[in-house]
Image: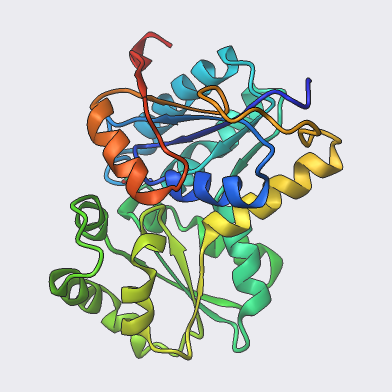
Amino acid sequence: MNSSAPIGVFDSGVGGLTVVREIMRQIPNEQIIYFGDTARVPYGSKSRKTVTRYSEQIVRFLRQQDVKAIVAACNTASAYALDEIEKEIDIPVIGVIRPGAKTAMDVTRNGRIGVIGTEATIGSGIYARYIKEQNTEMEVLGKACPLLVPLVEEGLLNDPVTDEIALRYLSSLIDSGIDTLILGCTHYPLIRATIGKVMGGHVTLVNPAYETARELRELLEGAHMLNQSKPELGDNRYQFFVSDGADKFIRFANSIIKYGVLSAKVVNIEEY
Ligand code: DGL
């Protein structure tokens, strides 16, 4: 595999851009091809079977773009589909869950870890499983917070409505004695300040987006696949594809990442 080939990153919609932002910061020489499944979002309320089928279609699309590695930048897709994807492809693929779980285990002092995410991610119990596989003594408390995704997509990042909903969801975790909280959904890093305020300063927030970019860097380095040449600044460095609503995607993307996103191509993902 050519080390100057792009990295494929996908998500159910715009949320995976929080992972793209970290990859751009931590491994700036890499080219990225991003696919956001904006026609079929949200994944968080869908079944394992459906999310797996969607994810496999996206992986087929990304493979056709000759990517050298794939990042499932969606907690729900990582929870439900990563094992299936790993079986099917011969290039490295990483999800966002293992890196987040690993970091939470490193930073917790009392072994009580909270995790918030979509109904699918929390219902799958995957964070708890990963953590307990490593250390059976750890306790993991999950809480699904489905309304936080639409609030973020509405741009209500610093808003009393978001504060109120976050408080309702998180109140059971506040009194649970956790000292670490995994932001187990792509959108939550965008309201990190609100979540931090609600939980209080004694709770360390773990952002799997940051940890995933770090793990990706280590993986590429270990495989001698880091891009050695500096790509030209231009349209091909970062390419964005969506399944619907390109204009809305571009607006949201430009509110998250500094690199000016000028275009997003619409792909009929059902064809893959
Ligand atoms: N990207 C999803 C996740 O991280 C959140 C949005 C959705 O439900 O599709 O789980």
Q: Nearer the viewer, residue 189 or 257?
A: 257
The x, y position of residue 173, in whole percent, is: 36, 81
Spot the residue most to the front.
Answer: 233
**Percent position of residue 57, x then y:** 45, 20
Please, is residue 115 above or below residue 28 in the view?
Answer: below
Between 104 and 233, the one nearer to me in the picture: 233
Which residue ends up furthest to the top in the rendered image? 271
The answer to whether 65 appears left or right of 40 in the picture is right
**Does 232 sit left or right of 225 as displayed?**
left
Numbered circles on residues, count:
0
Asked whether residue 39 appears in the rendered view, the answer is no
Question: Which colouring convention does the figure follow?
Answer: rainbow
Q: What residue is drawn where x is 57% and y is 12%?
A: 64
Residue 174 lies, in percent from the top left, at 35, 86
Quadrant of the frame with the C terminus: top left
Q: Is residue 268 left or right of residue 151?
A: right
Q: Give the percent coordinates (x, y) of residue 61.
A: 50, 16
| Residue shown at 16% from the left, 76% from the top | 164
Q: Is residue 160 among the parts visible in the rendering?
A: yes
**Residue at 30% over, 82% down:** 172
Image vertical order of residue 204 relative to residue 37, above or below: below
Image position of 110 with respect to 146: above or below: below
Image check: 101 left or right of 215? left
Q: Which of the image's four quarters has the N terminus?
A: top right
Res 188 quadrant in image: bottom left
Q: Nearer the viewer, residue 195 or 157?
A: 157
